[in-house]
Image (cartoon, grey):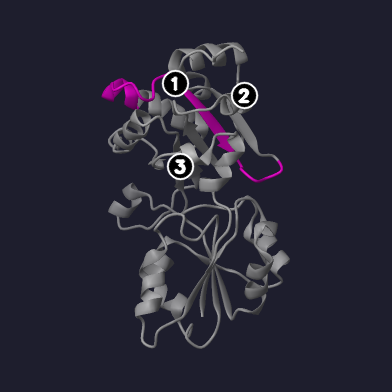
Amino acid sequence: MLYFIGLGLADEKDISVKGLEIVKKAERVYLEAYTAILLVEKDALESFYGRSVIIADREMVESSSDSILADADKVDVAFLVVGDPFSATTHTDLLLRARQSTPTIPVRTLPAASILTGVGCTGLSLYNFGQTVSMVFFTDNWRPMSFYDRVAENTKLGLHTLVLLDIKVKEPDLAQLARGRVVYEKPRFMSVAQCAQQLVETEEEKGQGVCGREFIAVGVARVGAEDQAIVAGTLGELSEVDMGRPLHSLVLVGSRTHDLEREFVREYAVNRETFDKAWDAQFGAAEKA
């Protein structure tokens, strides 16, 4: 059987008891290592699991999946995913290949916490979130802004927008690739500050009034870890914060908020005075008792 096992968000101990039992008995254990990362190294996982772990990079999963599926109709194979296995559709193709193989490989999924639910730590109601979008690193020649329309749709409905930030792990250097050499760039992880700045730049170009410098947002870092960090403020303020090591995410706050959400988020404000002014300007002043 092929097991898709969610690992949660922080470290080696976030795996479920059931998932750990499967890992310990599986013939092979793969760790998907390109859509997200845990906050600990592979060695920590292997020590806790009591067995070796095979790193499955993008090339292996997308181009050499046969090695992962080999004999999975006869033995147990564990495929570990940071967060929840199917919070995104990235691994759907591998599951479909297992189902369509001959003989068919049975599949089982063990879900876990992901940033889609973990972001509730901000105090913003998960019921009030709209479409999730992704922010990639802008370059001089490539500034994709397709996310903006989704943000505008959420804003029109008064919904919060979770922005997932780009990570670059084992990405080929295109300049070297053009010379026929395969050289990988150093890993890079987008920060809340860079995301906020790119949102502001996008607003300056698009001009629909959904993510300007004075718009309220909440930045999160290392959700679920002991050093989890949350910061709230305007995008202008967040573009200057340093939230430390990855992984980071950002939430654009929608107008469909409750007083409890405001009170909760306000505790994390960079500056409560400017937070109150920006909130009142964007959503209207809170009613006084």
Chain part drawn in magenta: 202-226
Foreground disc of the pair 1, 2: 2
Residue under the point 33% across and 21% down = 209
CA gap between label 1 and label 2 equals 17 Å
Can you give x and y, in whole percent of width and height, for residue 262 in the image?
57, 24
Q: How crowded is mark 2: few (under 14 residues within 10 Å), some or many (20 or more)?
A: few
Can you give x and y, in whole percent of width and height, for residue 150 in the image?
32, 37
CA gap between label 1 and label 3 equals 18 Å
What amino acid is at disc 2? Glu
Q: In the image, which disc is placed on residue 215?
A: 1
Q: Which of marks 1 and 3 is nearer the N terminus?
A: 3
Q: Mark 2 points at which residue?
A: 263
Residue under the point 45% across and 42% down = 164
Q: Mark 3 points at which residue?
A: 164
Q: Which of marks 3 and 2 is nearer the N terminus?
A: 3
Work out whether residue 64 can be spotted.
no
